């Protein structure tokens, strides 16, 4: 009998570091907003980033896909150094950047859907124009991803006809369609009415169960506690705590985190 090759189980894959942030620093107008950030994320992990407003959460996420360029430090996704061409040691050119960003999906607070395109076309857009897929191919993939986020019934709707939760689920499907290795979420539920938050968090929880690697800036403590593998706390641009949720929410090392959680 011929033995078929066996795909390694997800748990075996999960041991691998996929994101490595090393000594990352970023300034705006001479003011340091991130200082010496070090963070390692394993394949399949969900990392929640907490911290008060202005602490540098968005900037950290934006550096991870080079929407902001840090002055110091490095970011690797897999073997690849983000933002820098390994051969020339120079910053990536526009096309190379677009290629790199395919591997790192981003979901924004404000959805950023194209208002003039239907739900289906919003998800197909980058497949057609960045991945250069044929129309039938792009449509098939878009439909699979929209099914995953429970939006198959709205393929021909325009964003203006959707609720905020539906818009965000379409934005997630659009990111998934590119088959990213890492998904970044910047406060994905902060713009939503409270009753719409849950449907988006449920989709994100489902993705975490499927093994997606996710970095999530959030104020949703229940999500951070129940879905993440690591919780990171930023304070004035410094990473002051990184712990598994169990420890983070009950017995954090940092007095600032204890104060933030009102533990004392
Ligand atoms: P958070 O997402 O935690 O609220 P941000 O990363 O958005 O924090 O911002 C961190 C700091 O950097 C803040 O003081 C903010 O005002 C500043 N900042 C963010 N983006 C810019 C920018 N494009 N130009 C100048 N300052 C900025
Ligand atoms: Mg922010």
Image (cartoon, rainbow, N blue to C red):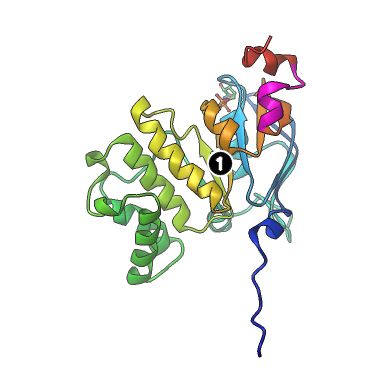
Task: From the top left corner, tell me how far across and down residue 151 is, in percent.
Answer: 32, 50
Residue 234: percent from left, percent from top? 66, 25
Q: Is residue 172 visible?
A: yes
**For this view, does 109 lie left or right of residue 41?**
left
When asked about the image quadrant of residue 113, the answer is: top left
Quick check: is 249 in the magenta stretch? yes
x 46%, y 51%: residue? 175
Which corner quadrant of the figure contains ligand 1? Answer: top right
Looking at the image, which residue is at 66% across and 89% down?
2
Considering only vertical position in the picture, is 214 above or below 16? above
Which of the two residues, 148 or 62, is positioned nearer the viewer here?
148
How busy is the neighbourhood of tag 1: few (under 14 within 10 Å), some, or many (20 plus)?
some
Q: Nearer the viewer, residue 67 or 21?
A: 21
Direction from residue 142 to residue 97 in the image, left or right: right
Location of residue 112 with respect to 194 vertically, above or below: below
Q: How many marks?
A: 1
Asked if 14 appears above or below 28 in the picture, the reply is below
At horizontal 35% and vertical 37% (from top left) the residue drawn is: 165
Which of the 4 image quadrants contains residue 26? top right
251 in relation to 262, above or below = below
Instruction: Indicate the quadrant containing the N terminus: top left, top right, bottom left or bottom right.
Output: bottom right
Image x and y of residue 138, in percent = 37, 65
Which secondary structure is most common in the magenta stretch? helix
Q: Nearer the viewer, residue 221 or 237?
A: 221
Residue 80 lies in the magenta-colored region: no
Residue 86 location (% of width, % of height): 73, 58
Quarter that holds the C terminus: top right
Bounds of the magenta segment: 245-254
Q: The residue tagged with tag 1: helix, strand or loop? A: loop
Outermost bottom residue? 1
Q: Which residue is mark 1?
A: 67
């Amino acid at each position: 009998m011929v033995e078929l090759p066996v795909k390694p189980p997800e748990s075996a894959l999960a041991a691998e570091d996929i994101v490595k942030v090393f000594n990352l620093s970023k300034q705006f107008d001479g003011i340091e907003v991130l200082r010496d950030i070090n963070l390692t994320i394993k394949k399949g992990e969900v990392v929640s980033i907490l911290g008060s407003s202005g602490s540098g959460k968005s900037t950290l996420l934006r550096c991870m896909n080079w929407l902001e360029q840090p002055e110091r430090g490095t970011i690797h996704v897999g073997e690849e150094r983000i933002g820098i061409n390994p051969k020339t040691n120079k910053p990536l050119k526009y096309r190379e950047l677009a290629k790199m960003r395919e591997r790192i999906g981003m979901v924004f607070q404000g959805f950023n859907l194209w208002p003039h395109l239907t739900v289906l076309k919003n998800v197909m857009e980058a497949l057609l124009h960045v991945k250069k897929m044929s129309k039938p191919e792009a449509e098939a993939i878009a439909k699979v991803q929209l099914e995953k986020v429970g939006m198959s019934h709205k393929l021909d709707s325009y964003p203006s006809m959707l609720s905020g939760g539906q818009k965000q689920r379409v934005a997630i499907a659009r990111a998934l369609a590119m088959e990213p290795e890492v998904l970044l979420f910047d406060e994905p539920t902060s713009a939503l009415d409270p009753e719409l938050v849950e449907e988006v968090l449920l989709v994100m929880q489902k993705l975490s169960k499927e093994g997606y690697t996710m970095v999530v800036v959030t104020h949703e403590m229940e999500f951070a506690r129940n879905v993440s593998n690591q919780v990171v706390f930023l304070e004035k641009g410094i990473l002051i705590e990184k712990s598994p949720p169990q420890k983070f929410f009950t017995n954090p090392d940092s007095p600032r985190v204890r104060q933030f959680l009102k533990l004392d």
